[in-house]
Image: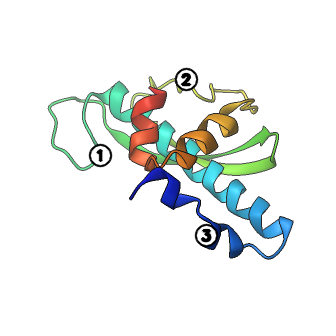
Amino acid sequence: MKPEDLLNDDFLKQFKTGSELTSFIEQLHKRGVEKILEGELDAHLEYDKHQKSNNPNSRNGYGTKTIKTHLGETQIQVPRDRDSTFNPMLIKKRESTADGVENIIISLYAKGMSTTDIEEQIR
């Protein structure tokens, strides 16, 4: 799929109100942030999810965190590791703001990048 095909007129016409478009952007932002955090954990553990590894540290579920952005408050799932050595760079521990992240995610998505591609670019 070409980037210009992603946000074509037909796609944008599906949004009948401003709140529908805002809701879509909020969902895109939430999903992008969560995928980037998963990518950060992959890099920290030095293996991808569902791969076998000799690393004694491994994934240990998710924690819930409420972050504040220009789009409002959003509740995200933050991945954890067993040794608690994972320190996310995107949204650091004990911080609840993610200023500017939404602009990066939306612009990369508009260029036709998948969440996996965005995750790789943000690292």
The answer to whether 44 appears left or right of 26 in the picture is left
Left or right: residue 92 versus residue 2 is: right
Residue at left offset 44%, top offset 38% = 119
Location of mark 3 (residue): 11
For marks 3 and 1, give the one nearer the viewer. 3
Residue 91 lies, in percent from the top left, at: 63, 29
Residue 112, image x and y in percent? 47, 49
Q: Quadrant of the image for the N terminus?
A: bottom left
Q: How is the image coloured?
A: rainbow
CA distance separating discs 3 and 1: 32 Å
**116 on left or right of 37:** left
Q: Which mark is residue 49?
A: 1
Q: Which of pointers 2 and 3 lies earlier in the amino acid sequence?
A: 3
- Residue 112, compared with residue 23, is above or below; it is above
**Which x, y percent locates residue 110?**
57, 48
State the residue in front, 50 or 111. Answer: 111
The amino acid marked with disc number 2 is: Met
Q: Nearer the viewer, residue 38 or 60?
A: 38
